Image (spheres, rainbow, N blue to C red):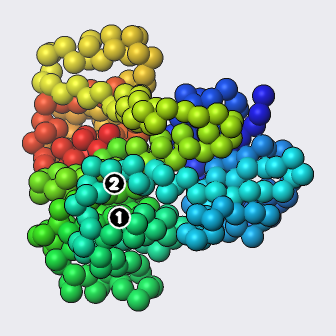
């Protein structure tokens, strides 16, 4: 059986093994490599090929004996094949992924001011696609670039905003790369992050009525194209939509909210037995971490204190995925909790 995998520095959030298990009959593992270990990995691995993610999409390029014209032009590689002579061929299938992500709005972006947040390897691919689609002017925003986040006050008329940064990605859920309220003419938001399923940026877009798309479909499509290169076999394009939907089904949390005695605990246990998902009782988590019962917390510190603790622990629980979570009915009285729950 051929061996493939994903090279990156922090991969605890990755869905790639699950996706590739749906795409082909080969092994696929995660390879977390520190920057000082990159050379050893590139010269000593026994893989037939691998995908590449943050922060190595540009750093692997010098190791490739040949690059596709696309990878060379973009300056970023996310798929590497090992040839029979041991040399590497570098390709960029992120291009295919982002092109599919933009499918629904590609006819509307031509001639529209577009902001790309971030200047890493992913941003280069995104910019290449956007240039092909005719986005203009196309502006890259970064902390240390020509256009910084402080300069965005001059670009409040941007129509499309694409986030290629890891801001808001697991485990640092809830963070915003910018405030969409400052962009009243925004027509569409794309966030390349796929964990959580809905980032703070996407949730804000939803509240403002701005159409948006997350990174899961892009992930599935780039994996489909990479798998075709790995195996030499074609895979129907519809597979990307099916895979994205399957990943959502597996990772979305099931949240049961209700007052004491309504049956949520019994239903939670039934669903746990049925699905084998981990069951988390939020009230039990609060009591365990606080070392006292909820009635005691209410009596000693009041409801406001309890609700703050509840929000804090809910935030930690709901950043995980594939869970069954039972909560008290009061959890929805705090607006912030609604976004915490809805992210996954």
Query: What residue is shown at x 46% (from left), y 68% (from top)?
Result: 128
- Disc 1/disc 2 C-alpha distance (Å): 9 Å
Q: Is label 2 in a helix, a strand or a loop?
A: loop
Query: What residue is shown at x 25% (from left), y 40% (from top)?
Result: 341
Asked whether, in this view, residue 88 is left or right of residue 305, the answer is right
Mark 1 vs 2, N-terminal side = 2
Residue 324 appears in view:
yes
In this rendering, is residue 258 above or below 203?
Answer: above
User: Most extreme residue toward the right, as rendered?
Assistant: 85
Q: Position of residue 338 (x, y in %)?
A: 18, 44
List the residue tagged with mark 1: 133
List the residue tagged with mark 2: 102
User: Most extreme residue toward the bottom, as rendered?
Assistant: 146
Q: Position of residue 67 (x, y in %)?
A: 70, 63
Asked whether, in this view, residue 339 is left or right of residue 69, the answer is left
Q: Are marks 1 and 2 in contact (CB under 8 Å)?
A: yes
Asked whether, in this view, residue 147 is left or right of residue 327, the answer is right
């Amino acid at each position: 059986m051929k061996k493939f995998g994903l090279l990156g520095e922090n991969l605890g959030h990755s869905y790639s093994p699950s996706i590739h298990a749906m795409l082909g009959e080969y092994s696929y593992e995660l390879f977390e490599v520190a920057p000082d270990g990159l050379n050893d990995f590139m010269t000593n691995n026994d893989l037939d090929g691998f995908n590449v993610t943050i922060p190595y999409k540009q750093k692997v390029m010098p190791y490739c004996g040949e690059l596709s014209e696309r990878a060379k032009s973009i300056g970023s590689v996310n798929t590497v094949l090992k040839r029979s002579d041991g040399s590497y061929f570098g390709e960029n299938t992120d291009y295919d992924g982002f092109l599919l992500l933009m499918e629904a709005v590609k006819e509307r972006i031509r001639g529209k001011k577009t902001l790309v947040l971030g200047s890493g390897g992913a941003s280069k691919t995104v910019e290449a696609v956007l240039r092909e689609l005719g986005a203009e002017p196309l502006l890259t925003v970064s902390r240390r670039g020509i256009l910084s986040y402080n300069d965005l006050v001059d670009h409040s008329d941007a129509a499309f905003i694409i986030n290629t940064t890891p801001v808001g990605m697991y485990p640092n859920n809830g963070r915003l790369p910018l405030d969409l309220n400052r962009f009243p003419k925004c027509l569409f938001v794309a966030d390349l992050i796929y964990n959580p399923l809905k980032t703070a940026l996407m949730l804000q877009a939803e509240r403002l009525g701005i159409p948006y798309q997350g990174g899961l479909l892009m992930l599935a499509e780039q994996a489909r194209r990479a798998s075709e290169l790995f195996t030499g076999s074609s895979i129907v394009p519809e597979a990307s939509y099916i895979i994205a939907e399957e990943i959502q089904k597996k990772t979305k949390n099931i949240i049961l909210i209700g007052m004491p005695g309504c049956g949520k605990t019994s239903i939670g246990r039934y669903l746990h037995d049925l699905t084998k998902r981990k069951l988390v009782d939020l009230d039990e988590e609060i009591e365990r971490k606080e070392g006292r019962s909820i009635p005691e917390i209410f009596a000693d510190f009041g409801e406001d204190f309890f609700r703050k603790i509840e929000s804090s622990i809910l935030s930690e629980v709901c950043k995980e995925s594939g869970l069954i979570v039972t909560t008290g009915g009061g959890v929805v009285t705090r607006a912030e909790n609604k976004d915490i729950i809805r992210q996954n």
